[in-house]
Image: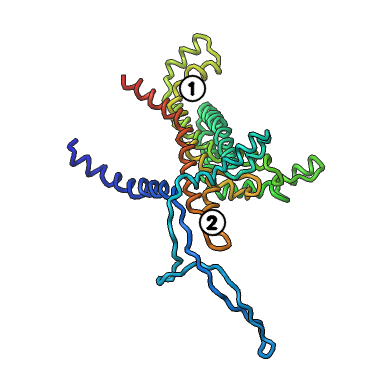
Amino acid sequence: MKFKTFAAFVGPSVFMMFLFIALPLISVFMQSFQVTQPVMQNIEVETCTPGFLTQTCVTEQKTVPVIGEDGKTVTTTEWTGLQSYRNVLQMDKVWGAVSSGRLGDILQIDFWKALRFTLMFTLVTLPLVIGVGLLIALTVNNAAKSLRGPVIFVSLLPFIITPVIGSLSIYWLFVGDGIITRMMEQWSGTNISMFAQAWTIELLMYFYRVWHVAPFAFVIFYAGLQTVNMDTLESAVIDGASRFERLRHVIVPHLMPLIVFIALIHLMDCYRVFDEIIGFRSQAHVISLQWLTVDFLTPDDAGNRAISRAAASAMLTMIGIVFLLIWPLRRTWRDHKGGAH
């Protein structure tokens, strides 16, 4: 293929990726080392009580932002180095908790609290999604042909539902007088509040993520099962291999590239968990790194946003994603090099 032809096909995609991915990423990286604040000024404000003869006026000093000629607040930007990262990580409190032996206090800091949940959510649901997806795929593959269509349709429904709608559906099943909560209360004879404790909320979040994403893994694995070498499976049966041995030594090695692919997609998606926090309304007990970044961008009572801390939180989140992707990317590269030879 000529270079001009190649450039004509690839150029627009590269330009759009640079415009909508690279430039915003560079901007966020730069903002994580800056602090933008409104310019404030002290003015005298006179406040008078209602009335005419008994009217009383009081003059007081107030600090208000400076408004420019365009009607917008005047701001100043200063380079602060790693200060935004220090504000997010709060390492002084971390070292204080470590030195005093109260390690639990670390999880009271927003960033470390969000990091703990994000890592747990990502790493716990990953094997469950792969295992449940593979189990469904094996079940459908061995089912009668007349049943495969309806089973595939029903299995894909959780994946079709919008994430926020799906999480809200699970939320209303368990919250207050939800159907499942009332059934559990009637069975146990005690009042149950699934959203009063952090660990029960987390369990429901794990359940929802597996329920929502396992159909995606099922579709990938089901397609991969159609390409398994039947001669190899028949040879294994003749040699006396059990069903589990055929799964371990024939099917799983054949599906390993797909397992790595699903792991890549799941790690990238789960580490940015946000919909579950909103759907389950868990901010008081459980937060994620993505939610923390959005919370920094939410204006406070004075209308100010912690943009520098939000940028630092976003950069730390991306660094975490890179670390999680090292193993599957190395595995993919090793398989690629092996296939090339």
Dot 1 surroundings within 10 Å: few (below 14), some, or many (20 or more)? some
Q: Is residue 154 toward the left or the right of residue 51 in the image?
A: left
Q: Amino acid at mark 1?
A: Val
Q: Is residue 10 toward the left or the right of residue 321 in the image?
A: left
Q: Earlier in the sequence, mark 1 or mark 2?
A: 1
Q: Nearer the viewer, residue 59 or 109?
A: 59
Q: Find the distance from the CA under tag 1 to the CA under tag 2.
A: 46 Å
Q: Are marks 1 and 2 in contact (CB under 8 Å)?
A: no
Q: Residue 202: where, in percent of width, then height? A: 64, 40
Q: Is residue 102 visible?
A: yes
**The C terminus lies in quadrant:** top left
Q: Is residue 156 toward the left or the right of residue 334 in the image?
A: right
218 lies above or below 160: above
Q: Amino acid at mark 2?
A: Thr
Q: Secondary structure at mark 1?
A: helix
Residue sitting at x 17%, y 37%: 2
Quadrant of residue 205 within the rendered picture: top right
Q: Nearer the viewer, residue 43 or 309?
A: 43
244 lies above or below 76: above
Q: Is residue 85 toward the left or the right of residue 200 in the image?
A: left
Which residue bears the numbered disc 1? 252
**The N terminus lies in quadrant:** top left
Which residue bears the numbered disc 2? 298
Q: Residue 319: where, in percent of width, then height? A: 46, 38
Q: Secondary structure at mark 2?
A: loop
Residue sitting at x 50%, y 13%: 237
- Specify the farthest residue to the bottom: 53
311 lies above or below 218: below
